[in-house]
Image (cartoon, helix red, strand yellow):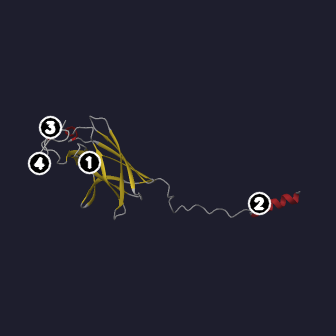
Amino acid sequence: MKTSLLALGFLAVTGCSTTPDPPPNTDKPDADAPCSTQLELGKNTAQGFVPFENDQTVGVLLGFQGFRFIEGAARLTHANTEFAFFRFQITFKDHSPLVQDRAAMVTPLPDGTQLAENVQIFFNDIPMAELLEEYPRIDAAVTAGTCTGKQTLSVRLSDAGTCDDLTQGGSMFPDGGGPCADAGL
């Protein structure tokens, strides 16, 4: 019996087992692991992407069906994906917060970042005359693939040239042709 136990002990000590698995490669990130992206809201111009600065004046456009919105874009880092999903919460001093979701296609830029175009932020529930000269806080969150990012900024809303003489209720187009969709109400 002692001989059997001795033999079993010898086999256990000498490694009567399979080769151990190699340690995980810690040099490469897991493709499915969550990551962080830097989110910058701004505008895409002929000169390229220009980020919005805090308290910067941003024009509100009046769409053909009365929609009021900022035509924006977003620059992302470390987000190798084709689509980005945005959630915006816009907080005004005298109105309930607006919450909205957007999706946008993402294209690579020469500097290695990615650009999401046509990231529109809408203000349809607030009359145009009450939007102008306001400084809403925009809390933006993005999910791009497994990456997430956030940005908070305040912008000053101004007329982007869609209505004339907003001091008189915002009732004229720049060409004087007709009333604005919400007549400044």
* Circle nearer the viewer, 2 or 3: 3
CA distance for labels 2 and 1: 71 Å
* Chain-order first, disc 3 or disc 1: 1
Pointer 4 residue: 175
Which amino acid, by three-letter code, is at mark 2? Ala
* Residue 141 screen position, x and y as percent: 38, 47
The answer to whether residue 98 is above or below residue 49 is above
- Judged from the image, the secondary structure of the residue bearing numbered disc 4 is loop
- Judged from the image, the secondary structure of the residue bearing numbered disc 2 is helix
Q: Which mark is residue 169?
A: 3
Rate crowding at label 3 as few (under 14), some (14 to 19) or many (20 or more) other CA atoms within 10 Å.
some
Pointer 2 residue: 12
Side (left or right) of 3 relative to 16: right
* Chain-order first, disc 4 or disc 1: 1
- Judged from the image, the secondary structure of the residue bearing numbered disc 3 is loop
CA distance for labels 3 and 1: 21 Å
Q: Residue at x 38, y 53 (%)?
A: 84
CA distance for labels 4 and 3: 16 Å
* Chain-order first, disc 4 or disc 2: 2
